[in-house]
Amino acid sequence: MSETNRLQKIRNLGVRLQELDLVALAPNKSYASTALNFLFAVHKLDRPVGVPLEHTLRTLGQAIIASRKVHFSNLDADAVIDFFCREYRVH
């Protein structure tokens, strides 16, 4: 998936999180940034700064593996996005 498509899906996730009243969009923040901040906060991780989106998503993937005890050794960026879109029912 291209980075543009990844960002669009993350944005859609941010919109959904706001619909569920799980986040409030702060002034000058994007839905994508808000969604990522929320996901890192839920997993009690510091969000990496200055790294590519793929690295950021892989960090979340490692958190999913550790906290959910899934049977994967690695989740790629697209799998991480799909995981959260399914969890929060983003279409």
Image: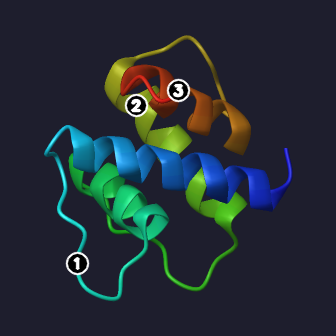
**CA neighbours of label 1 inside 10 A, class few (<14), some (14 to 19), many (20+):** few
Amino acid residing under circle 3: Phe
**SS label for mark 3:** helix
Residue beneath disc 3:
83
Measure the C-alpha gap from mark 2 to mark 1: 30 Å
Residue beneath disc 1:
26
Position of the C terminus by quadrant: top right
Residue beneath disc 2:
66
Callout in the foreground (2, 1)? 1
In percent of the image, x 51 and y 56: which residue is there? Answer: 11
Amino acid residing under circle 2: Ala
Q: Is residue 25 above or below residue 54?
A: below
Callout in the foreground (2, 3)? 3
Side (left or right) of 78 relative to 40: right
Relative image position of residue 64 (x, y in whole percent): 43, 32
Measure the C-alpha gap from mark 1 to mark 3: 25 Å
